[in-house]
């Protein structure tokens, strides 16, 4: 018996080493991934829901082509020049980690080094194969000039690029009659031009939604149960469910309030939050009545259920918009004071972009508000001790922030709001996603709370102890 167990342990160790060195050998595609890997179309797109393994399928296809051995179709012999294109370096860092976890290590040259958290070496990350193939990671932010001199055999686009770069990418694969592959969930960006290319027959569209069958690897068991899929569906906002869960082109917008998980009887509480929390103030500038809003939020970035963020909305101050920067500063100072906090207690200040207003001479901005704080606090110019940062507003940022807040509302104890925030309670109960009177409070909440959990690398938190 001991000898049998020893042989079994040795076999498992050997299998583990093989899996580490050549994980691609153990990759078993799901039906959507298999259809994508089998496609011989010049341009093919896997348009699918979140969590369906789109990127994994695209990366497996890239590696098969780079090593010159594809189990599902005939590919040109190496060496191959391949690009993987993403919309940001942050996104590409995650893609590089997946690439490293999938690529056979014995196929790579010794100088292709991956460092967790940093990616592959080089200003433009590059992976070199022993057979001469090269895979480079590029962002769309490098612009058309970064594409102009390249001749490529294959391009993988992970999430849609700007329309203006599409022609350049097509031109780069033309000489070698290469292939373009797109993996995406159509949300957060304008994809109408891609839809038109699909209608014109220029892109082969492989469309799959979330189901147990579509997350079942060949010869295996479903990676998600139906109850887990239903739970995932509940976490998505109704306005984005059709796209995120089914990969649909359109949102299938559902009329009604956005925060369907918000319940004043559950979430409104005057109990003081406890634990190590970070404090944010979000400011939505406006010059009309009720549009200048500052919201005070305490956040535990990983302190809630299963490590999810926990949000406690402590207070809010609202002006008629005709106030001076000094008056706005005094209102915020009073809000901090009634919560037992000082300026130094705030980890991150985030304000909206400059607002000119509809009335003659109306103007609000982060710089003007900081000047108001300087005058009220009687400190020299430039010595305030903090900066009101401009809100980060890329495409899709509104519903990204809203989704994070809504998910917290669905978890017991991960979202509370003080009863004094009467207007914000009304906003959360009534907002339908429109740019209306309720959006000002929602925006200030997003700025003050969500950026504490999505942009932590941009500031040094104080980790204030409360309770």
Image: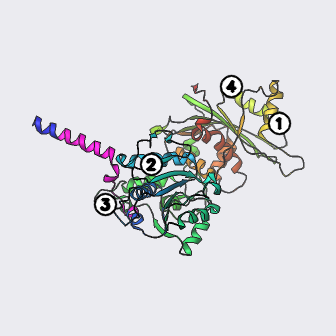
Residue found at the far left of this picture:
1
* Left-right relation of 408 to 396: left
Q: From the image, tell me which residue sits under label 1.
A: 325
Q: Which mark is residue 218?
A: 3
Q: From the image, tell me which residue sits under label 2.
A: 128
Q: Is residue 43 one of those drawn in magenta?
A: no
Q: From the image, tell me which residue sits under label 4.
A: 344
Screen quadrant of the N terminus: top left
Residue found at the far right of this picture:
360
Mark nearer the N terminus (3 vs 4): 3
* Left-right relation of 261 to 344: left
Q: Nearer the viewer, mark 3 or mark 4?
A: 3
Residue 80 appears in which quarter of the rendering?
A: bottom left
Q: Nearer the viewer, mark 3 or mark 1?
A: 3
Q: Position of residue 352 (x, y in %)?
A: 73, 44
Separation (CA) of disc 3 from disc 2: 30 Å
- Could you say which is closer to the camera, residue 365 or residue 231? 365
Separation (CA) of disc 1 from disc 2: 56 Å
Q: Position of residue 71 (x, y in %)?
A: 33, 62
Which region shows up in magenta?
8-33
Separation (CA) of disc 4 from disc 2: 49 Å
Q: Residue at x 51, y 51 (%)?
A: 136
Dot 2, how many residues are within 10 Å of its Cα: few (below 14), some (14-19), or many (20+)?
Answer: some
Mark nearer the N terminus (4 vs 1): 1
Residue 253 appears in which quarter of the rendering?
A: bottom right
Q: Residue at x 41, y 42 (%)?
A: 110
């Amino acid at each position: 018996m001991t000898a049998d167990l020893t042989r079994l342990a040795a076999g498992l160790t050997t299998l583990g080493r093989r899996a580490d060195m050549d994980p691609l050998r153990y990759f078993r595609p799901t039906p959507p991934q298999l259809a994508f890997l089998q496609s011989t179309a010049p341009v093919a797109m896997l348009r699918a829901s979140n969590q369906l393994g789109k990127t994994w399928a695209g990366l497996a296809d890239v590696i098969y082509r780079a090593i010159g051995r594809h189990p599902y179709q005939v590919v040109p012999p190496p060496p191959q020049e391949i690009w993987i294109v993403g919309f940001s370096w942050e996104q590409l860092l995650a893609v590089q980690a997946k690439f490293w976890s999938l690529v056979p290590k014995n196929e790579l040259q010794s100088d292709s080094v991956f460092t967790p958290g940093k990616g592959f070496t080089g200003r433009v990350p590059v992976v070199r194969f022993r057979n001469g193939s090269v895979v480079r990671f590029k962002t769309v932010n490098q612009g058309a000039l970064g594409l102009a001199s390249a001749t490529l055999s294959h391009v993988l686009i992970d999430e849609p690029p700007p329309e203006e770069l599409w022609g350049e990418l097509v031109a780069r694969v033309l000489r070698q009659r290469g292939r373009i592959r797109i993996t995406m969930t159509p949300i957060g960006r304008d994809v109408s031009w891609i839809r038109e290319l699909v209608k014109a027959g220029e892109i082969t569209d492989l469309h799959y939604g979330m189901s147990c069958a579509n997350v079942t690897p060949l010869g295996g068991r479903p990676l998600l149960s139906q109850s887990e899929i239903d739970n995932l569906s509940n976490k998505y906002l109704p306005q984005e469910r059709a796209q995120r869960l089914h990969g649909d082109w359109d949102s299938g917008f559902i009329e009604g309030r956005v925060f369907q998980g918000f319940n004043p009887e559950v979430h409104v509480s005057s109990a003081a939050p406890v634990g190590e929390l970070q404090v944010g103030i979000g400011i939505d500038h406006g010059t009309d009545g009720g549009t200048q809003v500052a919201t005070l939020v305490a956040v535990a970035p990983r302190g809630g259920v299963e490590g999810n963020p926990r949000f406690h909305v402590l207070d809010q101050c609202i002006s008629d918009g005709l106030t001076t920067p000094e008056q706005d500063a005094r209102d915020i100072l009073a809000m901090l004071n009634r919560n037992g906090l000082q300026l130094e207690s705030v980890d991150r200040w985030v304000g909206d972009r400059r607002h000119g207003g509809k009335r003659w001479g109306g103007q609000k901005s982060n710089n003007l508000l900081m000047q108001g704080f300087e005058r009220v606090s009687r400190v020299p110019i430039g010595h305030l001790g903090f900066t009101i940062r401009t809100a980060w507003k890329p495409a899709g940022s509104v519903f990204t922030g809203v989704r994070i807040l809504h998910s917290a509302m669905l978890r017991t104890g991960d979202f509370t709001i003080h009863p004094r925030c009467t207007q914000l309670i009304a906003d959360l109960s009534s907002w339908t996603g429109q740019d209306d009177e309720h959006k000002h409070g929602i925006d200030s909440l997003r700025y003050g709370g969500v950026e504490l959990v999505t942009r932590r690398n941009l500031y040094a938190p104080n980790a204030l102890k409360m309770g």
